[in-house]
Image (tube, rainbow, N blue to C red):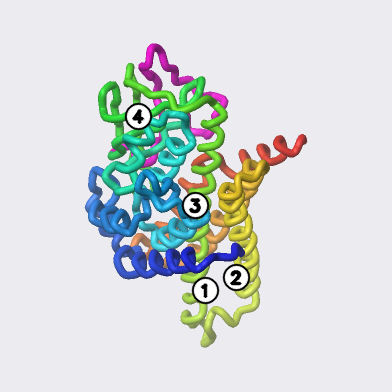
Amino acid sequence: MAALNDEQTMLRDMVREWADNESPVTAFRKLRAAAPAEGYDPAAWRALSEMGLPGIVIPEQFGGTAFGYLSLGLVLEQLGRNLAASPLASTAAAASAIVLGRSDAAKAEWLPKIASGEVVATLAIDEGPVHDPAKIAATVTDGKLSGTKAFVAEGDSAGVFVVAATDGLYLVSGDVGVTRSPRHMTDSRSHAQVTFDGAPAERLGDTTLTAQVIDRATAITCAEMLGMAEQAFHTTNDYLKTRVQFGQQLSTFQALQHRMAKMFTELELMRSSVEGALEAIDAGRSDLDQAVSLAKAVASDTLHLVSREMIQLHGGIGMTDEHDAGFYIKRARVLETMWGNAAFHRERFARLNGY
């Protein structure tokens, strides 16, 4: 486990308390029923913005707090526990591209707006159902970007896009030359196909920047997955301790104890790998790409296991829409494929190590 300083501990506890009191899973259930166009609760986003969370990876000179990626991961972990529908992960990933980018004008114009929560930002990278940076086909001619991005998280409401083209990353703001087509996916969150047709674009950097930003977006996603896996495990464990069958608590059956023990050990490995990736980003380590691929592979496998076991160990009730287990497995399957699944990152990890 990462060694947290006092500020990080306070941040984690503050967000955990807010999530439990203001954004429990019941809030997500209501949001799913209401199906707002944004895909999230604007009031909840304002509350998170008032806590300064959109500015965690933004420098102080632009209105952020510069707490770093481990701190951002702690926040997303706590929100992930309750499946809080928030554009924070997408916004932070896009903000990281602007921070790392070479455009001072973009930093001055957009980072303060993102840090305050005034603007939702997102990445528009992949152009097909499978994550593959090598297959990016969007192009820019005379400052105009054209191309289609297949699955853009928060694409329904984003005010600014960080878009990958064949030669690097570009900033596209507003709706000039931008067409959004909502995609209804199993996790009931905001996903859209976004088509850019001669959209005015400002260059942020080359393909090296694209790779750096994708690594950060991947690590951020792993943090949300960690929170989901932890909560799914604890919910299942509590159920086994209270459910009685054949006159005994389910937790007394050795076969079920073994299954819970396996999940516990896998969760410990997941936490180490995810926090290690976030710390690698903060430290600027040269092997952060390897750390990120290790984290995503482990996170995908572990969340897949725990979300599946959550349903199986709850029995029949776990298959019903009235129980929360279904929400976890649906969100899990989306996040497992986002930014590359476990197989993609195992292959990438091997390639980065010369195999």
Q: Residue 77 at what x, y percent from top left?
A: 47, 59
Where does the magenta region start and end? 128-156
Q: What amino acid type should be assigned to the residue bearing mark 2?
A: Met
Give how far across and how far down residue 85 sits, in percent: 34, 53
What residue is pinned by disc 4? 194
Instruction: Give the number of the mark in front: 3 or 2.
Output: 3
The residue drawn where x is 43% and y is 62% is 78
Residue pointed to by mark 2: 260
Which label's residue is closer to the chain start, 2 or 1?
1
- Mark 2 near mark 4, Cβ–Cβ under 8 Å? no
Q: Earlier in the sequence, mark 3 or mark 2?
A: 3
Residue displayed at 58% across by 56% down: 275
Asked if one can make out residue 219 in the rendered structure from this viewpoint, the answer is: yes
At x 55%, y 54%, the residue is 304
Q: Is residue 291 left or right of residue 203?
A: right
SS at circle 3 = loop
Q: Nearer the viewer, residue 47 or 328?
A: 47
Pointer 1 or 4: first along the chain: 4
Q: Which residue is mark 3?
A: 68
The spot of residue 335 in percent (x, y) is 48, 47
